[in-house]
Image (cartoon, helix red, strand yellow):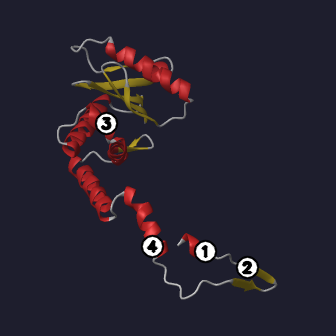
Amino acid sequence: MIQAILVFNNHGKPRLVRFYQRFPEEIQQQIVRETFHLVLKRDDNICNFLEGGSLIGGSDYKLIYRHYATLYFVFCVDSSESELGILDLIQVFVETLDKCFENVCELDLIFHMDKVHYILQEVVMGGMVLETNMNEIVAQVEAQNRLEKSEGGLSAAPARAVSAVKNINLPEMPRNINIGDLNIKVPNLSQFV
């Protein structure tokens, strides 16, 4: 099972942090720092697998990573996962990001965090791999983009809600509401319309 997915730049700044096991925030930050230091000190000629740090479970867990340009993609997994399978999963995730952002870079991860999380959720959810077919993942992302465009985006939702309330066509606003023994007097709201 995947315990955590970490993406950070060459300077150790986290760009994507997703834990599938509950850790307090201070421990999460320590895990990111420790993982960065473990991965950074490794030479590029060395394999991309290493034992997990002391904070994330030690020898029971493995860190599997790939270094692309200025970003490290690190998956922390337990011993039941295949190292080569996870390396392939990292490749699928990065290639999917590349297709969705047309030559993905660190700034895409910063400014489109919601889309990056959506793509990640199409690949991994709850620490379990859902999809490895890049074309299927891209198709789902494109369907989500079409849905957002058809709805006018989330930023247009409040304006649409206000206009819908203003366009309610009531012939006359009720002044008193009687429900059994309960009598409610409705104040004059015409000044707000």
**Which structural element holds mark 4?**
helix
The tag earlier along the polypeptide, 1 or 4, is 4
Q: Secondary structure at mark 1?
A: loop
Q: Is 135 placed left or right of 83 in the picture?
A: left
Residue reaching furthest to the front:
191
In the rendered image, the quadrant that contains the N terminus is top left
Q: Residues within 10 Å of mark 2 (few under 14, many from 20)?
A: few
Nearest to N terminus: mark 3 or mark 2:
3
**Residue to which mark 1 is pinned:** 189
The three-letter amino acid code for the residue at tag 4 is Ala
Residue wearing tag 3 = 109
Q: Amino acid at mark 3?
A: Leu
Given residues 187 and 49, the one toward you in this image is 187
Residue type beneath disc 1:
Leu
Q: Is any part of residue 150 visible from this angle?
A: yes
Q: Quadrant of residue 150?
A: bottom left
